[in-house]
Amino acid sequence: MPDDTDRNRSDDSDTTLPTDRTTPAVAVVDAQSPGNVGTIARAMKNFGFEDLLLIDPPELDPDGEAYGFAGHAREDILPNATEITFDDLVDNYHTIGCTAVTNEDDRSHIRFPFSTPADLAERLPTVEAPTALVFGRERVGLTNEELERIDEICSIPAAEEYPVLNLGQAATVTLYELRTLTLDEGDTQLPDLERVRAPEPMYDRLYDQWADLLEEINHPDEKREKTMRMLRRVHGRADLTKREANTLLGLLRRATERPAERSETDQSSR
């Protein structure tokens, strides 16, 4: 765990470590594939993370695989990544080691206890220290020796018979679950889904129109009360908007009028 004093990373940039943010950095330990580093950078860009830390990384050629996989993250996250040592990481950050396999219970504490990414999304905002999500190698992940030095463990729930994810996949799933730390609803590409419920007088008109239709089609009297109660509950759960309620009113009105129209047509044809 870091204290409240500023420390410097052991790289040539002499960048001062943050001490008061809750948005985690993303640390990748000894990745073998430049493509996975690029994939992680891209996922960071997708979900609002900015600070990429690399421990013993492969060569990241601007014309190579990492930048090819990074998408728009090639413009900022990847070129601004900081190379540090594992010692610097555990000394200066509250670290969360991500591992697929726990295989332990409360009798051992190298890989136990653990949180899921969803658990972390709720708890990390309370950690008043710079935090880092730590992802390990493609083949073996983080070693037990590394996990012993890490503050806590995170594991993605997956099928028991095959819980191991690709490095890039694991980072993407974890960052997606933690996006609430970085993105507000208005910060995503999705339209505003806030729905305005139709006013109650419109609901009353809708229920009156249903009652008229039941009468027009000679719905059994003994069933009408129960049917209206069911319709009220269906519409209540739906939280209809004004436009939706208007559309239903028009359809019900037309359906109610059709029997009368057919009757008039039949009489005139005689």
Image: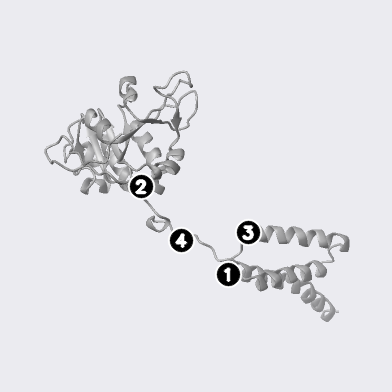
Q: Amino acid at mark 3?
A: Ala
Picture quadrant where residue 11 is located: top left
- Spatial separation of the CA atoms under disc 2 and disc 3: 31 Å
Pointer 1 local density, CA inside 10 Å: few below 14, some 14–19, many at least 20: few
Q: Is residue 250 visible?
A: no
Pointer 3 local density, CA inside 10 Å: few below 14, some 14–19, many at least 20: few
The residue that mark 1 highlights is 243
Q: Is residue 33 visible?
A: yes
The residue that mark 4 highlights is 192
Q: Is residue 237 above or below residue 2?
A: below
- Spatial separation of the CA atoms under disc 4 and disc 2: 18 Å
Q: Is residue 215 above or below residue 269?
A: above
Q: Amino acid at mark 1?
A: Arg
Front-most of residues 39 and 194:
194
Does the CB distance between marks 2 and 1 fall below 8 Å? no
Of labels 4 and 2, earlier in sequence is 2
Image location (x, y in percent) of residue 219: 83, 63
The residue that mark 3 highlights is 238
Image location (x, y in percent) of residue 201: 67, 73
**What coloring was used for the rendering?**
one colour
